[in-house]
Structure formats: C-alpha cells, structure tokens
Amino acid sequence: MPTFALIDGNSFYCSAEQAFAPELRSKPLVVLSNNDGCAIARSPEAKAMGVKMGEPWHLFRKLPDGRAVAWRSSNYALYGDMSRRVYDVLTERVPAVEPYSIDEMFLDLTGIADLDRFCRALRREVRQLAKIPTCIGIGPTKTLAKLANRIAKNTPALGGVCDLRCPADRAGHFTVLPVADVWGIGGRAAAKLAAVGIETIADFVSHDPQAVRDMLTVTGGRVHAELRGVSCLPLSLMAPTRQGIAVTRTFGGLVETWRDLREAITNYTARAAEKLRGEGLEAGHLAVFAHTNPHNGDPWYSGQRAAEIEPTADTGALIGEAVRLLRAVWRPGFRYFKAGVMLHDLAPAGQQPGLFATRDKAKSAAAMAALDAINARFGRETLRIASTGAARPWRARQQQLSPRYTTRADEMLIGRAF
Amino acid sequence: MVGYNGGNTTGFVSPAGDSLEGPIDLAAILDLRQPSRYPVRVLGDALAGRGILSGDILIADAAQPPAAGHVAVVMLAGDVLVAQLAFRHGHWWLLSGRPDTAPLPVEGEDAEIWAVVTGLVRTKV
C-alpha cells in the first residue's frame, strides 16, 4: 500500500518574512496581495486578533487594532527561493516530492519505517535548514494526506504531524468534520451533498459509490474512493502543460492616458512572453482587456479584444499584437483600474509549423534566448523592450517590500558584528 | 559578433576552440545552491580580530551544527548579530570581539543560532 504525505508551510509568506526579520517574530504580521490590496497570509498572532483572509488592508489598518499589526508587500522573489529551499531539503531525504503549490508538497513515503519519527525529524530539518515551520499529514491516499495535514494544522496538541493511515483513527475524525473540508469538494458539490442530507465526511463515505458518481461525476467518485483508502491520484512529478498564461494587474494609481495604458500592457505582455518561453511554449491566441473601477463611482467601462495569431513566443511580436488589440479596447475619458494580457492555444515551440509563416523563427528564437539569458544572469528586466517605459506610473504599490535577501547581492541579510 | 569567448576567431582558427571553459563560478565554489546556505553582509568592525570586516559577505550554513569557538549568525532580541559562540553553564553565549563588551546569553523568546559561518567573500581588499 502506498503512503503519501502533504507537508505545507505554516503561514508560508509570513514565515519567509520572519525567517530574516527577528523583529517580526511572534508578532501579528500580514502579507498583502499585489498592489498592497488585502491580507493573503497571516501570522498566528494576526489570526488571533481577528484578521480575516482577504481582509481589505486600507480599511483594517484604520481600525484601533490595525496599527498593532505589521504588514509587508508580497515579495515573490523571496518566497519562490524559500520554496525552492524547502523542496531541495525534502528531495535529499524523501524518495519522491511533488511541488503542488509554492507552500505545499506531496511526498511519497512508501516503505519508510517509523513514519512518525521520520516526519518529526523532517519538520525539524526543514525548519532549521530552510527556516520554514511546517505541518505534515500522512495517509494512504493524497486526499487523506491533505485532510491529515489540515487536522495537524488545526490541532496544536499533535505537534505538527497527523497520521490517518489507520481506518479507526479516520473514523473518529470523519464523524465530526464537514465534507466541505475535503480536498476536491467545492462549495457547489457540498451544497448538492447537503441537499441529500450529507453533512459530515462520515455521511459521505458511507454513501453508495454509484450514487456519488451520479451526483458528482467521476471526479467526486475519485474523492469518495480516496477517502476510503483507495489511492486514485498518483504523485505527479511534472507540472501539467498549461492551458493559458495570464498576466493581469490592478494599477497602483488609476491610468488615464493611452501612453500609460500601452506601457502597462506592453510590460504584462513581456512578462507573459517570458513565462511562455520559460516553459518552452508558443501561443496561438492572445487576448487583452482593461476596465474601470466598479466600486469607486466612476462610470463603468470594460473592453476586451482577442485574436488568433501566428504561433510565437517572441516578445516583440506578442507586444505588437497586444498593442494592436489594445487600440480597439482603448476609450479616452475613462480612468482605468485594471488591465491584463492572456495567452492561449499553447503548444511546445516549433510544433506548429506555419505554412504562411512571416517571421524568421530561428532568428527570433536566438534573440529571445539571448534576452532571457541576460535577464537570468543580471536580474529580471536588465534588458527590456523600450516601450515598457521608464517612470511606470501604473506600477503596483509595494510600500512595504522587504529585501530579496537570497537572490540579490545588494539586498542581503545584514548582520551586526558583535 | 555576439561575444568573443576565445574560440570564435574570424581569421585564424583558434587552437583553444575545443578546450573553452567559462569564468570561474564563485557560487559553485561557495556551494550557494545548498538549501541551507545563506549570504549575510557584515556591518561593523567588532570582529576584525577574527578577520571579519565591515562589508564582508559571510556564507552562513544552517546545516552546520554550532560549536564553541565558531562564528555564527544569531537572532537575538529582534537583532541579527554575527558573533563568536561559547558554551557555558549549560547554554550558548555570544562573545564580543570588543574587550569592553560583556558576553550575551542566547536566551529569550525567539532567540536562535540561525546559521554557522563557513566562508567569507571580500570583494575589495
């Protein structure tokens, strides 16, 4: 029988900040979304003060309690590198690791003796080496490992590890936990189940498998089987090929001029093209949108244009197409609040031979490889397309951005000689 | 010409063509890919006696077990300190490089020996 585990970082973004900033430890701390909008990570102390996930920060910080909570802008360069460290520590110690998200990794622990001891040592090592506190859930399926992880997180007495391999242990939890707590059971599925009187996981597991499939399709049937200890989801060591790449942002300040909007879209397209090449893909469809703020009393305007394009991953070509579409989206006299670029119809580069190709693919690929190599070596945006702008008034607010301690030579952790 | 690397000559064929190597990679020598290794910049000259000057880049390894006499990066009372370790009366102390500064016990909420210094880079001598 296989054994899976899910290990995840406790308040991962907050923990990454606290790793390098002792003055933030054991304090109420939140990390805000892009543009310093709302709370997306909360330290336990911030949770205890009643800060909610998604709390709009411009409102909360004005409350009497708001001042007591430290906040940081999201520093994805730092979080990405800390996630890489957690993954590297795990791969040195565990047969197989699936990075499921920036702060969660599935582990294959099949065949490891004394799992409880092993997992407690693993938590200590990740904490010591990668500086991130974690919880681990163990189970015979990924769904049960994920549920065990949730129980470990919500039950401090377990010391960060919960093992659901034993059916008797599972039964105790199943009678008290709502079925909506299960990975793969969304709000709509939970509502359907509630309609036929299924509230707890125990209710769900004892339900007839065929009836579950009829109600929730094959996907629901798989969750049902996994909860009964039948493994249906293997560890996937490769990220699936993406369906699309989107780069969308809320602006730091409202954008009113064609020039600023074009500059923003040009930047988002450059970033999307970089992601595209990072995965060795080309896009055959491009969409651009921009809209006003629906909540500030401004007149509502939302424009979107999309087009099929000759498959490419060339930054210059994609920017050309994006700006052409943006001209049709642009209406003067509005204050734009958010805009974005979406690439679809993705396929591995070179697989979509254009019968009527107009671009020199080899030349474009060489130029893009040089662009990416220079930016990888000397830092993001060392070399960029001139139309991406210099002043960038549309740029997101990041008023409390911490240093990129581990990826920038001029932003390293500073230690005072004692 | 994209960049000359010792091999791509325009006239005479370079005899080095089959033996080209890139510049020495300091990140590889310092093993910075190790998930436990962190660069730390030193501020202040208190450790000049140990050969550690202000502005030096220390390579701190969190996988290295602390030992008396080692220099370590320590989180203490909200500060990030670089200091020599000592073990006395059952716990860790920081010894100052300055003769007039008393040792500090590594204790209190969140006090942590964060990583042990294993290497040093000085970009200007």
Image (cartoon, coloured by chain):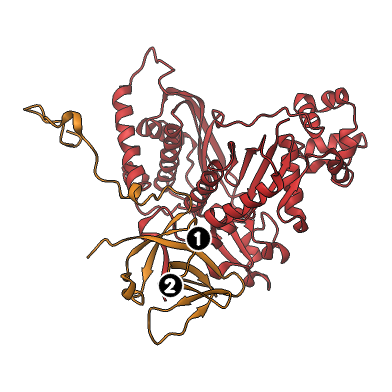
Chain colours: A red, B orange
Please, is residue A356 above or below residue A379 in the view? above
Q: Residue at x 60, y 46 (%)?
A: A300
Q: Residue at x 68, y 62 (%)?
A: A44
Q: Amino acid at mark 2?
A: Ala
Q: Earlier in the sequence, mark 1 or mark 2?
A: 1
Which residue lies under the disc numbered 1? B65
| The image quarter in which residue A113 lies | top right
Q: Amino acid at mark 1?
A: Pro
**Taking A89 as reference, is A49 left or right?**
right
Q: For this rendering, which residue is in front, A335 or B86?
A: B86
Return the x and y of residue A269 as percentages of the image width and height.
43, 38
Q: Residue at x 74, y 51 (%)?
A: A152
| Residue furthest right as drawn | A197
Please, is residue A70 above or below residue A217 in the view? below
**Taking A263 as reference, is A219 left or right?**
right
Q: Secondary structure at mark 2?
A: strand
Which residue lies under the disc numbered 2? B83
* Residue A367 in sight here: yes
Q: For this rendering, which residue is in front, B91 or A143?
A: B91
**Dots 1, 2 in contact, CB < 8 A:** no
Return the x and y of residue A346 as percentages of the image width and height.
50, 25
